[in-house]
Amino acid sequence: MRDLFEKIYKDKGPLGKWASQAEGYFVFPKLEGQISNRMKFQGKDVITWSINDYLGLANHPEVRKVDAEASNEYGAAYPMGARMMSGHTSLHEQLQQELAAFVSKEAAYVLNFGYQGIMSTVDALVGKDDIIVYDVDAHACIIDGVRLHMGKRFTYKHNDIESLEKNLERANKMATQTGGGILVISEGVFGMRGEQGRLKEIAALKKKFNFRFLVDDAHGFGTLGATGAGAGEEQGVQDDIDVYFATFAKSMASTGAFIAADKEIIDYLKYNLRSQMFAKSLQMLLVKGALKRLDMIRTMPELKENLWKVVDALQSGLKERGFDIGSTQSCVTPVYLKGSIPEAMALVKDLRENHGIFCSIVVYPVIPKGLILLRMIPTAMHTLEDVAVTLEAFSSIRERLTSGLYKRLSASVSAAMGD
Ligand SMILES: Cc1ncc(COP(=O)(O)O)c(C=O)c1O
């Protein structure tokens, strides 16, 4: 028998193995100062393109005022306990009603955390005879939800409707045998590459197959659709989404999340979501903060307009300069470059140290080997000047990358890592 920790001592995992070179700089960086378009990294001012504060609410004076008042009134603890036992309040109910109305559903349920909330939603919606069919690029929280499922599951190729159809045929056959139903899961916006889930085409398949549709719209809520109600509204298929999920961690610049659906489904879920039944409810200061944020999203369309001004300037500027930004259809702006992991590290260092640009870097194994993904999140706080400075910096780093400079700079790192 082996010591349980033996494997941990030997292998830190695909990302953990980079810890000694990357921690504190490329991973677990410490961004300091108020959340904004400009923050401090290691004492230097940087334009920050890696925070999901899409609408700039995190530090909006009205939001800060309400957050402070709620904190004074309730502290961080109230209410204590799970919703079902002692953690329920009228303001939770009010927030649910307002959220449901905003996303055009009969009812909503507020969740303490998005990740656990959607895991439990998947878990509660399916029994062992049911079949899940989900996009292969789904967020980790969906995958973890699917992992709880005791029955069959199929993935379809990312945003590939033909592949979804094939898998629905398989699922259909299987469900006929088991006597179960089918749950299809997509994201409204895929957060790494920015593509919208093909919700309209998925919903159209309901004419051919009998399934229920769950959409995780973490990045779409607040940013897409005429009123900001998300990817379903943008694509005109909100009614075809049977269970809608969004987190407060992005456009709402807070913590918490919600699901929305027909009243009967929400009534069932609130008695069956294990991560909510057996965990503390969302604190009042966050509930009050969410009510304020939702009100601002509803009544201040200029927040979304400012966001999209920046998104359009950044994305069109990058395209004009010949950058590959993939097929994003949202605010998420990926920039794909070719290079090794050590080259990516040298490039990001140059961006941060010499150009004062902070964006997240994604490499293998999250994306294919040999690709570098610089993932940028524009917000309503950014200015067109931020965009202009960033575009100049990107042209400069691309030139250096193609000239082989980063390869030379990174040679010592490469040798040390056997890359
Ligand atoms: C697509 C998606 N779903 C769910 C979550 C989890 O939400 P939360 O941060 O509220 O736990 C995230 C991350 O925030 C996400 O990006």
Image: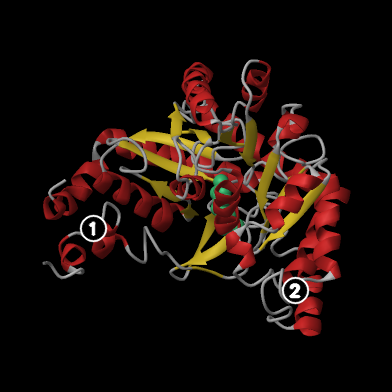
Q: Residue at x 58, y 35 (%)?
A: 183
Q: In the image, what residue occupies the spot 13% across and 55% down?
A: 416
Q: Look at the numbered disc 1 and give the secondary structure of its residue.
A: helix
Pick the front one: 278 or 249: 278
Residue for badge 2: 285
Contact (CB < 8 A) between labels 1 and 2?
Answer: no
Image side of residue 144 versus residue 259, left or right:
left
For the N terminus, the image quarter is bottom left
Q: Position of residue 98 (x, y in %)?
A: 85, 53
Q: Amino acid at mark 1?
A: Lys
Q: Name the foreground residue: 404 vs 264.
A: 264
Ligand 1 within 8 angstroms of badge 2 C-beta? no
The image's colouring method is secondary structure
Name the spot of residue 57 as percent of width and height, x first. Answer: 73, 59
Residue occupying image coordinates x 75% and y 73%: 285
**Residue marked by disc 1:** 17
Vertical comparison of 362 with 193: above or below:
below
